[in-house]
Image (cartoon, rainbow, N blue to C red):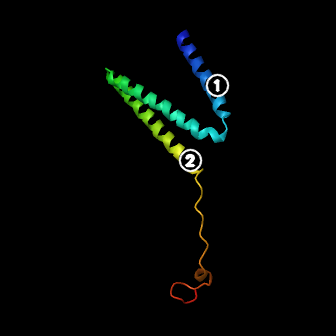
Amino acid sequence: MSTGILEFLTIFVLAALVGNEVIGRVPSILHTPLMSGSNAIHGIVLVGAILVMGSASGAMQVTLAFLAVLLATLNIVGGFVVTDRMLEMFKPKPVERAPKASDASGDDATGSPK
């Protein structure tokens, strides 16, 4: 391996370790805003992937650019789905109505006992 590739690999591994450490310490109440911010960042990644795809010249470049667009899109959609599901947890639960007096007697709609 050349020195350039080793440096890039070292930076990638350190970034992964630091990112894991930072995200692991985020309180659960902040996960939804963090996910929303992450979706905004991936929107920028999608725009960049589309721009790269527009200037791709070879079949391999077009294929990789299409894959980048596809994965960025899936990441954005998945992020919004997760955010929506997390926000559902904070909505108040519907209140169950108390049974009517006629239901409590054991009679059905015809008036005969069950």
> What kind of element bears circle 1?
helix
Could you tell whether 74 is left or right of 4 in the image? left
Looking at the figure, which quarter contains the N terminus? top right
In this rendering, the count of numbered labels is 2
The quadrant in which residue 71 appears is: top left
- Residue 97, placed above or below residue 18: below
- The disc at residue 18 is 1
Question: Where is residue 24 shown, x and y percent of the image?
Answer: 66, 34
In the image, taking residue 28 as reference, residue 48 lies left or right, namely left
- At a point 50% along the width and 44% down the height, the residue shown is 81
Q: Is residue 2 above or below residue 114?
A: above
Q: Nearer the viewer, mark 1 or mark 2?
A: 2
Q: Is any atom of residue 43 visible in this view?
A: yes
14 or 28: which is nearer to us? 28
Q: Nearer the viewer, residue 30 or 15?
A: 30
Judge by depth and name the residue closer to the eye, 60 or 17.
17
> How far across and how far down the image is residue 82, in percent?
53, 44
Residue at (48%, 36%) from the top-left corner? 75
x then y, percent, for residue 96: 60, 67
| Residue corresponding to mark 2 | 87
* Neighbours of disc 1 within 10 Å: few (<14), some (14-19), many (20+): few
